């Protein structure tokens, strides 16, 4: 018996039919993102064979050296979506300011924020990396989008997702009702539904954190990580340590298996290191729709009102019970 083959386009179209008043613009935007993922994935898979490794010689807004693949992925995302008439503005983790839609193209009703190539420092070692994106509705007046549109809290997202480029290329996203994963089949050139209605376990057995920073952690984080290492059969401890150093890869594994990812504030980065609008918000939106939780240690990530497009935040994300435990330690309640 042949397996049921559901392409991402079919899945999006079937979902759209549940909303009789839908115009199809949002569905088309998701398909545009899937197209961009194919182009970026193709180039990532050539790494080592063509001249896409190494640095460009420039630095980005964060003072970090720009890798060739970062620049390429950023340009692909922009060029795949600037002319469609579906977006009013974009913002990229690689660019200092918001990205207006070129005047020769029509503006639409949606806002796209993206990290074009998260974890790109690992590409030379053939470690999984990814693209992260989130979509909002336009809220500003006038035809063109503004900074106001890009500084909405994560709870206002209408879709978020990521593409992971690894042993296979996967696109995982949610439009608010369940989380689905699609694996790219290069033989037919399509993303096929492979993970339907992903649900993260309420508690996992994996913790992901860069313990090389432990000397700079506050006491709450130190106590929590030590707690995870202690033997307790009732709570399945000790946990296993798994840290790739590529946010998308660490998050993806924990989403499927359960567990917790931590990038806390520390003495060197008192406001955290990860970007709120490009990394924390979209992954938080996904994990909440999968039954998990995301926090900065004191409040829900999705409740934070961004003050700038490059604002940083601590991030504790993963299985609901694990993140709640971490919050209790951070707040001195345990």
Image (tube, rainbow, N blue to C red):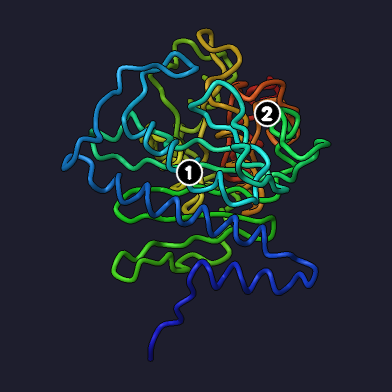
From the top left corner, tell me how far across and down residue 42 is, in percent: 31, 51
- Which structural element holds mark 1? helix
306 or 271: which is nearer to us?
306
- Which structural element holds mark 2? helix
- Residue under the point 69% across and 55% down: 176
Q: Mark 2 points at which residue?
A: 328
- Residue under the point 42% across and 56% down: 170
Q: Which quadrant is home to the N terminus?
A: bottom left
Residue, far bottom: 1
For mark 1, does the 10 Å Cα neighbourhood hold few (<14), some (14 to 19), or many (20 or more) residues?
few
Q: Mark 1 points at which residue?
A: 79
**In the picture shown, does residue 199 fall above or below 82?**
below
From the top left corner, tell me how far across and down residue 34 is, in percent: 48, 56
From the top left corner, tell me how far across and down residue 318 is, in percent: 56, 42
91 or 275: which is nearer to us?
91
Whether residue 6 is visible, yes or no, is: yes
Residue, far right: 141
For mark 2, does the 10 Å Cα neighbourhood hold few (<14), some (14 to 19), or many (20 or more) residues?
some
Q: Which quadrant is home to the C terminus?
A: top right
- Residue under the point 67% across and 42% down: 111
Q: How many marks?
A: 2
Estimate the spatial distance between the alpha carbons at disc 1 and disc 2, rounded to whole Å: 45 Å
Left or right placement of residue 332 versus residue 310 in this view = right
């Amino acid at each position: 018996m042949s397996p049921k083959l559901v392409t991402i386009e079919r899945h999006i179209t079937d979902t759209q039919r549940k909303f009789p008043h839908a115009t199809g613009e949002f569905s088309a935007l998701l398909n545009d993102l899937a197209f961009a993922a194919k182009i970026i994935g193709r180039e990532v898979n050539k790494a080592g064979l063509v001249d896409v490794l190494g640095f460009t010689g420039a630095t980005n807004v964060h003072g970090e050296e720009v890798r060739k693949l970062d620049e390429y992925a950023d340009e692909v995302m922009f060029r795949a979506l600037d002319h469609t008439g579906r977006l009013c503005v974009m913002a990229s983790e690689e660019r200092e300011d918001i990205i207006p839609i070129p005047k020769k193209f029509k503006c639409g009703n949606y806002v796209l924020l993206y990290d074009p190539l998260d974890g790109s420092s690992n590409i030379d070692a053939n470690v999984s990396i990814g693209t992260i994106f989130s979509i909002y509705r336009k809220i500003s007046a006038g035809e063109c989008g503004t900074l106001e549109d890009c500084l909405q809290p994560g709870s206002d997202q209408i879709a978020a997702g990521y593409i992971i480029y690894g042993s296979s290329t996967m696109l995982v996203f949610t439009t608010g009702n369940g989380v689905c994963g699609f694996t790219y089949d290069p033989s037919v050139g399509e993303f096929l539904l492979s993970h339907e209605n992903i649900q993260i376990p309420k508690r996992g057995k994996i913790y992901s954190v860069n313990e090389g920073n432990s000397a700079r952690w506050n006491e709450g984080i130190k106590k929590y990580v030590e707690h995870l290492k202690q033997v307790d059969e009732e709570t399945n401890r000790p946990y296993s340590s798994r840290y790739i150093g590529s946010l998308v890869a660490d998050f993806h594994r924990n989403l499927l298996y359960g567990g917790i990812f931590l990038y806390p504030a520390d003495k060197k980065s008192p406001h955290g290191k990860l970007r709120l609008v490009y990394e924390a918000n979209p992954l938080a939106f996904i994990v909440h729709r999968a039954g998990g939780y995301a926090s900065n240690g004191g409040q829900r990530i999705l409740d934070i009102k961004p003050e700038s497009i490059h604002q940083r935040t601590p991030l504790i994300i993963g299985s609901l019970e694990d993140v709640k435990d971490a919050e209790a330690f951070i707040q001195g309640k345990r």
